[in-house]
Image (cartoon, helix red, strand yellow):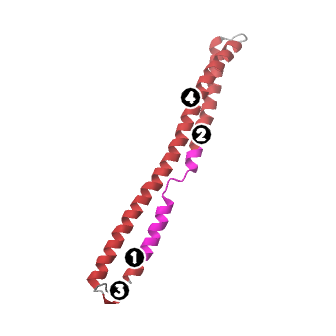
Amino acid sequence: MQQSKDDRSLGELFAELARETSTLVRQEVTLAKTEMTDKATKAGKDVASMAVGGAVAYAGFLVILAAIVLLLAEVMDTWLAAFIVGVAVLAIGYMLIQRGREALKKEDLAPRQTMETLKEDAEWAKRQTS
């Protein structure tokens, strides 16, 4: 025989609240894990993209740099030509690294959806105990 909510004892009400709260906490933890996994995957893809871009740029620059050094060596000392090219390459590399860092900074890694539902859950729990 099922009792109506008004006929339940205080102990039964607290037991039900404990069960529901436990279920809610498990669901929130699952949501947080899912949300953080999604965000970490996206950030990982951004980092991988930066790494691949850097490797491709590095290979291309090596060939071009050798050609530029050889060209400049025709009009100046070879060491000076290599130094000038090296400084230019460092500047380009720095710009690529900064671009990747800025893309990562824009990514919001906080579990916003979980934080919002936790606030809602706290309000729900307050209403249940009032």
Q: Residue at x 55, y 46 (%)?
A: 104
Relative to 51, residue 33 above or below: below
Assign the C terminus to one quadrant of the image.
bottom left
Assign the N terminus to one quadrant of the image.
bottom left
Q: Are marks 1 and 4 in contact (CB under 8 Å)?
A: no
Q: Residue beneath label 4, please?
A: 55
Type of amino acid at the residue the image marks with label 4: Ala
Of the two numbered discs 1 and 4 on the same chain, state the one appearing first in sequence: 4
Of the two numbered discs 4 and 2 on the same chain, state the one appearing first in sequence: 4
Q: Are marks 3 and 1 in contact (CB under 8 Å)?
A: no
Q: Disc number at residue 18? A: none
Q: Residue at x 67, y 11 (%)?
A: 77
Q: Residue at x 61, y 35 (%)?
A: 96
Instruction: Report the Cα–Cα distance between label 4 and label 2.
Output: 16 Å
Q: Disc number at residue 125? A: 1
Q: Residue beneath label 2, please?
A: 98
Q: Which one is in front, 62 or 29?
A: 29
Instruction: Report the Cα–Cα distance between label 4 and label 3.
Output: 66 Å
Type of amino acid at the residue the image marks with label 2: Gln
Does dot 1 land on a helix, a strand or a loop? Answer: helix
Instruction: Report the Cα–Cα distance between label 2 and label 1.
Output: 46 Å
Residue 52 in the image: state x and y as whole percent. 56, 32
Q: How many marks?
A: 4
Of the two numbered discs 2 and 1 on the same chain, state the one appearing first in sequence: 2
